[in-house]
Each structure stands twice: as C-alpha cells, then as structure tokens.
Image (cartoon, grey):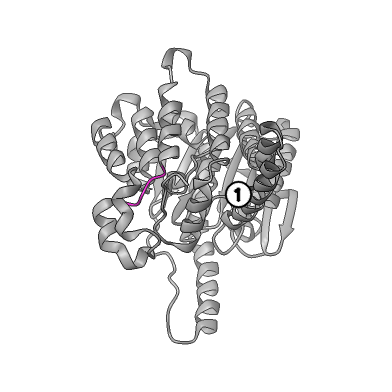
Amino acid sequence: MQGPARIIRSDGIANCKNLEPLYNWTEAGAYLTVDKVRCNGKSGAILCYHNPPVHQIGTAGLYAFHDGLDIVFERRDDLQFLLLCGANAPVHSGGDLKESLGRLKESLVKKRELEVAGASEVEIDRLFSWGESRLEKGVLLYRKIRKAAQYLRTVGICGGGLRFGGSAEIPLMTDYLIGDSRSGMCFSEALMGIIPGWGGITRVLVKAGIVNAAYMAKTGKPVFAPDLKAIGVYNDIVEIPFALPKKEKTGDPAQDEKKYLEDLEDHDDRAGALLLREGLEYATCPEEKIPFVGVNERKVLAEPGSIEKEVTRRVNPDHYAHIWAKPLRDVDREIAALGRPLAPQSIQAIDRFLESYDAAMFDEEAFIHKELQADAALYRDPRFLEGLRAMLGQRVPDFRTP
C-alpha cells in the first residue's frame, strides 16, 4: 500500500505499535484506513485518507470518511485519541469540481425544460438538492468528529502543500492541528461563486477570530503555515527540511510522470515519518504541553478596512472586462495588479453570514448549519457555472449577472 498508511502499518514510528486495522476502503488508487495503535502508553485510532494525484474528496471518499468515523465512535471506550492524516502532496484539492460541473450542467438543462413546461418553483429548486445533500454530508462529518472529541483527543495533520476547500475544512474540524512547514490553506470558493460549506469559515472564526475568518473567506488568498500558527489555526508547525516534489520537463512526458510519482511516494515516506511522529506526540502528551495562541495574542492578517477596500475592487466584474475569458497565465501581470475576480454573490453571502455572528449568542453547530444553507443557495445561481468553468479552465471568469 502506497502513501502514509504504509508507514502506519510498518511499525516504523518510534514508541508506536500498530495493533489492528479497524476499517479499510479502496477505490481506483484511493483509500481510507483506520488503524488502532498504541503510542506512548495510550491507545488511539489513526484515520488516513489518500487519493492521488491531487487528493480531492469525491463522493465515495466522503462516504468512506463517515464509515471510518462510525467505527471509531463505536470503539471509543478502547481509544484515547483520534489522529487524522493523509498524503503529503504539493496540492490537496477540495471537492471534485468536475463532478460538480457535470451535475450543475445537467441541473440547468432540466431547469430550462421545467420552466418551459410551467413547473413550480419548488419543483425547479429540487433539481439542485444534490448540492445541498453533499454539503449536509460534509456537515455531518463535522458533527461526527466533534462528537468523537467529547470522548477522545482529536488531532489533525496538515502535511504537504496547499489545501483547498474540503481538504482544509476536514482537519479544521479537529481540536488541534499540526502543520507541515510548507503547508497552507486557501478558501478559494469565492473565486468560483460559492462559499465554504463544510464549516470552514466557522471553524476559523472559532480558532482565529472573525477578522481572520473574513480575510480567508472573502479574499480567496492562501495563508501559509507561519501565519496559520500566528492566528491560532495551527497549534504547531513541523519543520520539513526538504522541498516538495516537482515534475521535471525532460521532453519525455511519460518518463517525467513516472519519475514524479516515484518522487511523491518517496517524499510521502520521508515527510510522513516526521509528521506522524509529531502528530502522535501531540495526541498523547499532557494537554497543557500543546501550544496555544491566546485570543489577545492572535495575529490579524489584515485590518477590516483593508479587507473591504480590496474586496470592493475585486468584486466588480467590470474591472476585468479587458481580460474576460483569457487564460490566467496570459494575464498574470493584470491579475497581480487587480487580484483575481471575486464572485459578487459569494461576497454578499459571506457578509450576511458573518453579520449574523453574535458572540454572546454563538452556537457553533447552528452557525455551521447556517454556513451550509448560505452555500447551498449559491448552487442555484447561474454564475456558479461560469465560476466552475473558469476555475477548471484556469481562465478569467465573467461574473456579470446573465
């Protein structure tokens, strides 16, 4: 078995003994495993998700997460911690965008047919229930991890490079986060026309405060390990003393791909050993030894006025009229000056959502459900199709109202 599960099952981690597999799911190179281990005198479960090459979370993988967590909860009396980990790749995608694009195109075609036939608004709206159903699965995942956290210490490892969407939101569901020194998180949803829907904004709000949550959700900019620790998202960073693999261009694409996959596998082993060792240390040490950034010590990524000034500029589609539909690589200077365009409907939804925050009346789970509802509503907006196509095609979107 390739990837981190090989390390977990090799007994190659000091002071850690693999006791038994609790759950296994595999599909076309992807897998999710849950193993019971004993480390530093404590028993726990390691849930490992691996889906090469970009580690997106497809529907089957999402169901496997649920099944694996159900097993962990059933065995909670035998366990003291839950550690979430995965591959250490350069990029970790969120949900499967191609899967969403296919479903969205199909829904819009049927919508036009129903409108011609005089169908009711309720019947038309039902066409988009697939989006809400998938979002509900993500939020249910949050509930399961938070339920487990009432009994076990939950720790997430963010290995490798940049995490988008669900690949960032799932580890955020844990109590404690350990980050690869080369890693980062990016809520890029506002670049497409939706918002994080699996509780990402809420969890950053809880860990890092409302201003940092607004910055991450509204600008769509990546935030890297040092800042993630400074704002309170990461509890600690593991210094990885070597670079992430890059694909060579020798003129032989097949050989370059083969070499790149070999490099990724070797990198997974080397980085995984360091990250798992540290993750298990934080899963088993006295709680007071886990680093924590206090509310008054958190870094603020940008002041509210600065965020609003930037967002106001980037949310106006007309500012991008001269480069609509052009490949991003061909307009890198313009994008560097303007910033990537933001979907107006996304920013409006985020503003409404964050304006409803009341620290005195805050209920985290209810707020996460509100985040889901705000995201689900945006699946109905036809500008989401433009945002998806532009993201997949790496071109400049046109977010004017159709």
Asked which quadrant contains residue 39, the reply is: top right
Q: How many marks?
A: 1
Left or right, 45 with respect to 246, comes to: right
- Residue 68 is one of the magenta-drawn residues: no
Kindly give the residue lying farthest to the bottom in the view shown.
Answer: 251
- On the image, numbered disc 1 is attached to which residue? 16
Question: For the residue labelled by badge 1, is the local secondary structure a helix, a strand or a loop?
Answer: strand
Which residue is at 47% across, 57% downward?
391
For this rendering, which residue is in front, 366 or 391?
391
Which residue is at 57% across, 41% downward?
379
User: Residue 291 placed where, x, y %?
Assistant: 40, 35
Q: Main secondary structure of the magenta part?
A: loop
Asked which quadrant contains residue 75, the reply is: top right
For this rendering, which residue is in front, 284 or 366?
366
Q: Is residue 188 above or below residue 82?
A: below
Asked which quadrant contains residue 101, the reply is: bottom right
> How many neighbours does mark 1 have within 10 angstroms: few (below 14), some (14-19), or many (20 or more)?
some
Q: Kindly tell me whether residue 289 is visible in this rendering.
A: no
User: Residue 316 placed where, x, y %?
Assistant: 32, 44
**Which kind of residue does numbered mark 1 sit on?**
Cys
Span highlighted in magenta in the image: 339-343
Q: Is residue 117 above or below residue 287?
A: below
Q: Is residue 54 above or below residue 379?
A: below
Q: Kindly tell me whether residue 180 is visible in this rendering.
A: yes
User: Residue 241 placed where, x, y %?
Assistant: 37, 61
